Image (tube, helix red, strand yellow):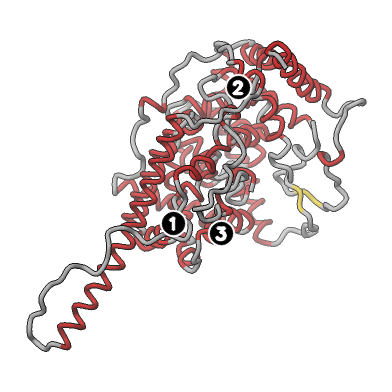
């Protein structure tokens, strides 16, 4: 097949995908049965729109009823605040009120104001539709976005049906934004980010909200999604420093089992705890994040580990720890929302006193360098969907940083354990020899760490991270290398869709 035929085939495939979303669920829509769920096995949806496979109680328990009554009372106060949003009186109360929780019925208005979406939208009239049209003609990410849209929030009433209105909106926002911010393009975590925003905003508003979250200095998520993940690397280093200072026992426990923070915290940083804590708590964290910015992610990451330290120390392998943090806590966080947020506030105070509440300003590599909304002609390989086989220098650099951190942690643990054993041997020798001095000998250990049960070589770290990159960099996991241990379940291709 020649170049012209390949480009034609890619265009036809893209056009077919866009037409399916344009048609939605109207008569004549072609929807594969396996893509469209059956509803008869479900009984109820909760107040946030999530479907449950068991009947919810007919009556609210007293505690939940009390919460809803308090929220109703707060709604009256919030309605007054929204009327006088820009006044000094509201600004004084805002911090306290948001930490208590924004009434769910008013989240759309409050989030829009916290992000200043309307102002950004006014400055860019017609820009969103322009990007939608451009995406239809030239998007090289449509295939991957189409696949991810059908996997995002499948238990939510508005995202459940294939080509539903919300699936249409999510597809449109993601394909349009990949064109608008060509430096980032599309990265899988963005579907969760846009998906939550679309629960509380209209399509164009969600588009601009995504842009604000990526480019505003307060959130600066551009550096998270950009190739090489420079902000993620910097924030994980800071996370390790916090654990080393305040939770050294837990840090050593993680290091002992070869557990680097990147294995359990991706969704904490990429999508602000979506699908890692119960959705009601996640919304409370989002409320505070939109108010106070990315220092909240750092503090909440530490708070989660602090609250669950005792249980985590009982788990003795990498997979069980990641399963606990990625799956168990999403189903049952074990702490009341108010208790969790109160703990977050204490953490913020603790980190502020230690001057560790934030890792500092973004590096040059994290800041957008390309002009937004300018079309960049894709390469032939991107147009026809040929995946890159070689790892980029940025990917190699990122992998080397993580590998070095993991290896350094394991060396430290082994050294400490062996030093302790050596000191114990010396004490025993001194006791057996009475008061006579004992000649010092070379330590009975090597500086080289013992092979870790789950040591992951560089080429495996690269492949495990491959699915986080833009589709043009992503491919199926590398063929199993005969000299390596099996890849832990926490590092599989489905990290973002556990």
In percent of the image, x 57 and y 48: which residue is there?
480
In terms of image quadrants, where is residue 179?
top right
Residue that label 3 marks: 324
The dot on residue 423 is none
Cα separation, mark 1 vs mark 3, equals 16 Å
Q: Secondary structure at mark 3?
A: helix
Mark closer to the chain start, 3 or 2: 2
- Which quarter of the rendered picture does the N terminus lie within? top right
Counting from the top left corner in percent of width and height, residue 305 is at: 46, 56
Callout 3: 10 Å neighbours few (<14), some, many (20+)? some
Residue that label 2 marks: 177
Q: Secondary structure at mark 2?
A: helix
Residue that label 1 marks: 258
Counting from the top left corner in percent of width and height, residue 2 is at: 70, 14
Foreground mark, 1 or 3, reads 1
Cα separation, mark 2 vs mark 1, equals 37 Å
Q: Nearer the viewer, residue 320 or 93?
A: 320
Q: How many marks?
A: 3
Mark closer to the chain start, 2 or 1: 2
Cα separation, mark 3 vs mark 2, equals 34 Å
Counting from the top left corner in percent of width and height, residue 68 is at: 66, 51
In percent of the image, x 31 and y 67: which residue is there?
417
Q: Give the side of residue 390 with respect to residue 37, left or right.
A: left
Q: Give the side of residue 348 with respect to residue 263, left or right.
A: left
Residue 77 in the image: above or below residue 483:
above
Callout 1: 10 Å neighbours few (<14), some, many (20+)? many
In percent of the image, x 68 and y 62: which residue is there?
62
Residue 295 in the image: above or below residue 61:
above
Q: Is residue 303 visible?
A: yes
Outermost residue to the right: 27
Mark closer to the chain start, 1 or 3: 1
Q: Nearer the viewer, residue 362 or 71?
A: 362
């Amino acid at each position: 097949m020649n170049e012209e035929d390949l480009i034609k085939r890619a265009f036809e495939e893209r056009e077919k995908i866009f037409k399916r979303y344009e048609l939605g669920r109207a008569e004549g829509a072609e929807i594969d049965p396996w893509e469209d769920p059956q509803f008869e096995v479900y009984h109820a949806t909760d107040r946030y729109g999530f479907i449950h496979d068991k009947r919810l109680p007919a009556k609210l328990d007293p505690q939940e009823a009390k919460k809803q009554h308090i929220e109703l009372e707060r709604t009256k106060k919030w309605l007054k605040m929204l009327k006088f949003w820009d006044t000094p009186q509201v600004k004084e109360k805002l911090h306290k009120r948001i930490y208590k929780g924004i009434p769910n019925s008013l989240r759309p208005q409050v989030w829009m104001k916290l992000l200043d979406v309307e102002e950004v939208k006014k400055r860019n009239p017609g820009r969103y539709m322009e990007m939608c049209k451009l995406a239809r003609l030239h998007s090289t990410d449509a295939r991957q976005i189409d696949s991810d849209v059908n996997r995002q929030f499948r238990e939510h009433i508005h995202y459940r049906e294939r080509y539903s209105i919300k699936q249409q909106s999510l597809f449109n926002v993601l394909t349009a934004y990949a064109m608008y911010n060509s430096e980032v393009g599309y990265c899988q975590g963005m579907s969760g980010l846009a998906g939550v925003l679309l629960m509380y905003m209209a399509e164009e508003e969600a588009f601009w909200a995504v842009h604000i979250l990526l480019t505003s200095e307060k959130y600066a998520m551009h550096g998270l999604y950009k190739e090489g993940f420079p902000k993620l690397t910097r924030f994980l280093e800071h996370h390790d420093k916090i654990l080393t200072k305040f939770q050294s026992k837990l840090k050593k426990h993680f290091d002992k089992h070869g557990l680097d923070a990147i294995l359990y915290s991706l969704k904490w940083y990429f999508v602000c705890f979506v699908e890692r804590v119960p959705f009601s708590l996640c919304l409370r964290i989002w409320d505070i994040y939109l108010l106070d910015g990315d220092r909240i992610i750092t503090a909440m990451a530490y708070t989660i580990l602090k609250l669950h330290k005792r249980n985590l120390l009982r788990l003795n392998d990498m997979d069980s720890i990641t399963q606990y943090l990625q799956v168990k806590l999403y189903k049952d966080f074990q702490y009341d929302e108010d208790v969790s947020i109160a703990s977050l506030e204490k953490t913020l105070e603790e980190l502020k006193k230690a001057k560790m509440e934030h890792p500092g300003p973004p590096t040059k590599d994290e800041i957008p360098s390309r002009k937004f909304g300018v079309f960049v002609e894709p390469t032939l390989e991107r147009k026809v969907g040929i995946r890159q086989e070689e790892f980029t220098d940025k990917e190699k650099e990122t992998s080397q940083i993580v590998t070095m951190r993991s290896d350094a942690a394991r060396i430290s643990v082994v050294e400490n354990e062996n030093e302790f054993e050596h000191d114990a041997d010396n004490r025993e020798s001194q006791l057996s020899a009475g008061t006579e001095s004992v000649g010092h000998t070379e330590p009975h250990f090597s500086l080289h760490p013992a092979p870790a049960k789950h040591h992951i070589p560089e080429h495996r770290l690269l492949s495990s991270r491959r699915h986080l990159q833009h589709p043009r960099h992503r491919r199926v996991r590398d063929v199993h290398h005969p000299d390596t241990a099996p890849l832990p379940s926490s590092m599989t291709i489905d990290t973002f869709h556990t």
